[in-house]
Image (cartoon, rainbow, N blue to C red):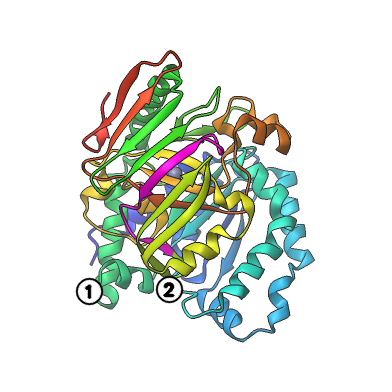
Amino acid sequence: MVENFESKLSEYARLLVEVGLNVQPGQTPSIEGNVEYAPLMRQCVSACFDCGARNVVPYFGDDFTTREAFLRADAAVFDEYPSYMKARVDWFLEQKSPRLSFTGSNPELLKGVDPARIQARRKASGPPTRAYFDALTANRFQWCVGAHPTLAWAEKAFPDKKGGEALDALWDAIFSVCRITGDGKAVERWKEHIAATARRAKALNEHQFKTLHYTNSLGTDLTIRLPENHVWAGGSDFTPEGVEFVANIPTEEIFTAPRWDGVEGRVYAALPLAMDGNLVKDFYLDFEDGRIVNVHAAEGEEFLRHAIDIDEGAHYLGEVALVAYDSPIRNTGILFFNTLFDENASCHLAFGEAYPSCVRGGEDMTEEEQKAAGLNRSMTHVDFMVGTADLSIVGTTQDGREIPVFVDGNFAF
Ligand code: ZN
Ligand code: ZN
């Protein structure tokens, strides 16, 4: 039993809609999730109308159906992207509909599925949805990703618990890292948290470091060049109309983009990486002129290689993110097997697409201009954790001064 479950669930819905999406009167948000998330999604629908939404458009998916199709559908299906699906995202783009979605699907949903089918699906859905997701990553409308437990996820995160007991444990963990206590004040607590994160990002922006140098006892020795006019962001984002929203709940990170061609050295992963239901363990990546030139994993190396081989851009980094080792998520001691949580447990990097907003004016640049400015382009974006208790990061300023950014895994300022 989760204590005060009903009141915590409605506090969570209000947090996602009021802080995450910050729905404005007259907007038509879309809410996407699995059929078993219906109780939370219904509360979110009501919370949207409470904010003055014109209408709310829910979309229900189903893990069973997804897996069954990946195993049994005609192989050609994965090379196609249905036109009605494209029409749908185009309509949302036209309306600038705020988008709420949930993570929580079975981490092993696609285990045993032919990786070629997964890759074909990604390739087929990439171009038709590119405009929509470009607008999303450029923050042209509000969007938020929250979480919802599923039995499979809960039993993965809590291997010593079964069934309802595992689900309750995961709900408790999600509520606690989302600062939900049942007192109805999560919205206020998040506003404070977001303001504190913004203060730290401002300090990093004022430094405008030329490079960051990462070292730890795992063997990481990596130098990352940052683009000119890079922007550290964290906590909240703003649409062009100035509407503030929080794209990830929970979020603890402050992030920017590296120069795609400015990464040198070796970085070791600090945590396993869950990819399409498969775990990649104890891996490192070597970089030369920004490009991944060597990959090694003790387990699951082929899944990592597949992800990097999806396009040329996936061979380069697109994100550098700072998270204190002493963070609420890592302090739970739980490996969630879910990027939304695990990426907020630790400093991380991502290979693949960079967020255009990470360079001043980046949203208004053409693809060529973005690349010239240092922003990586790819159809993928995969976060992996590099933060350890002994991680040191030293920033070098434009005039060559060295300033500690991380000491023993935590912010130095
Ligand atoms: Zn991140
Ligand atoms: Zn990321």
Q: Choose between 368 and 95: the one closer to the eye.
A: 368
Q: Residue at x 22, y 52 (%)?
A: 332
- Residue 353: x and y in percent read 58, 46
Quadrant holding the N terminus:
bottom left
Does the magenta segment cover residue 232?
no
**Residue identified by numbered label 2:** 108
Q: Residue at x 63, y 64 (%)?
A: 122
Q: Choose between 207 and 285: the one closer to the eye.
A: 285
Give the amino acid type for the residue marked by disc 1 in the picture.
Lys
**Residue identified by numbered label 1:** 161
Q: Residue at x 41, y 42 (%)?
A: 265
- Residue 154: x and y in percent read 32, 69
Residue 296 numbered tag: none
154, above or below 349, in the image: below
Disc with the residue nearer the chain's start (2 vs 1): 2
- Residue 79: x and y in percent read 72, 71
Q: Is residue 320 visible?
A: yes
Q: CA distance from mark 2 to mark 1?
A: 17 Å
Does the magenta segment cover residue 260?
yes
**Residue 162 left/right relative to 201:** left
Q: Residue furthest bottom?
A: 72
Please state the extent of the stretch shown in magenta in the rendering. 257-274
Q: Quadrant of ligand 1?
A: top left
- Near mark 2 (Cα within 10 A), the count class, few <14, some 14-19 or many ≥20, is some
Q: Secondary structure at mark 2?
A: loop
- Residue 223: x and y in percent read 41, 35
Whether tag 2 and tag 1 are in contact, CB under 8 A, the answer is no
